[in-house]
Image (cartoon, rainbow, N blue to C red):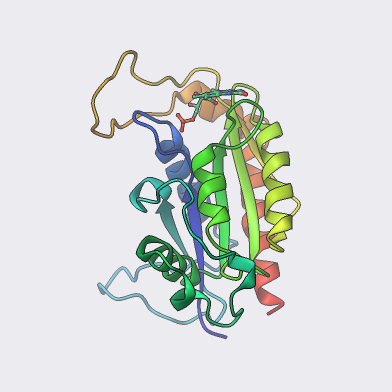
Amino acid sequence: MPPKHIAIVTSSTRTPRLNPTITQYVYDVLTNDPTLPTRKPSPTSADTIDTDPRHITFTILDLAKQSLPLYDESVIPASLPADNPTPHYTKPHTRAWSAVVREYDAFIFVTPQYNWSIPASLKNALDYLFYEWKGKPAGIVSYGSRGGGKAADQLRGVLTGLRMRVVGTAPGLAVRFTGLPVGAASEEEVEVELDKRDVEGWRESGVEGMMRNLGMELVCELDKE
Ligand SMILES: Cc1cc2nc3c(=O)[nH]c(=O)nc-3n(C[C@H](O)[C@H](O)[C@H](O)COP(=O)(O)O)c2cc1C
């Protein structure tokens, strides 16, 4: 079986934002999980050693770097040829986004809660495509003052509509202490550090363990293919 590529998607696109920090945390938890067959760099070589046919690579995919405008594609994604929809889109940014999504076998969407739902940037990026998502395993990690469970529920509905195979475990990170810089007006991305008290809370409440379960559920789904 060829290696499988899982994208961990950063979904909010404003500046400043917490999402890159939470996404990095999810990435760190999953790539440090010894039970997942993650592809690791060799300590003696710059190349990776490919010994486990089930190996998995995790890559962070940031929607802010995709430069997608508000949905403006004239064709309906679900009406395109399922095996190769990419050349049939009318806009260059849709064709580029289609090619990016087709590189991945599964996705973990890391989403904040915005007014009981997901950010428009995530819904917009999902709406652009159909067959590029269809049938692929998906996981959800949400965050918000109480864990963003309402955003996770809404996202599950959208991903099910896209015919993705959404796994059951959906960790929600309650962000109580980590804050964004107050009044930051810069267009530059500001690095936000997680407050240790939040991380300790997630460990103690088992949310980190749920993240590892989510990773294993995705691996099991990919193993079925
Ligand atoms: C427009 C907007 C709506 C929000 N709605 C909620 C909400 O419904 N529930 C919640 O717990 N937090 C809510 N928040 C707080 C966000 O969870 C928090 O600001 C988080 O940092 C947003 O992620 P981001 O910084 O990556 O954009 C909202 C934030 C924004 C900007």
Q: In this view of the protein, can residue 56 be seen by the observer?
A: no
Location of the N terminus by quadrant is bottom right
The percent coordinates of residue 6 (x first, y second) are: 52, 64
Q: Residue at left 55%, top 18%?
A: 176
The percent coordinates of residue 63 (x first, y second) are: 42, 49
Q: Name which quarter of the figure residue 111 lies in.
A: top right
Q: Residue at left 67%, top 45%?
A: 155
Q: In this view of the protein, can residue 69 be seen by the observer?
A: yes
Q: Residue at left 45%, top 48%?
A: 28
Query: Is 116 displayed left or right of 18 in the figure?
Result: right
Q: Name which quarter of the figure residue 107 lies in.
A: bottom right
Q: Name which quarter of the figure residue 147 lies in.
A: top right
Location of the C terminus by quadrant is bottom right
**Is 192 rendered above or below residue 20?**
above
**Is 125 rendered above or below residue 78?**
above
The percent coordinates of residue 47 (x first, y second) are: 29, 76
Q: Residue at left 67%, top 37%?
A: 206
Considering every residue shown, the one lying at the far bottom of the view is 1
The percent coordinates of residue 189 (x first, y second) are: 28, 34
**Is 161 rendered above or below residue 120?**
below
Name the foreground residue: 76 vs 224.
76
Name the foreground residue: 190 vs 39.
190
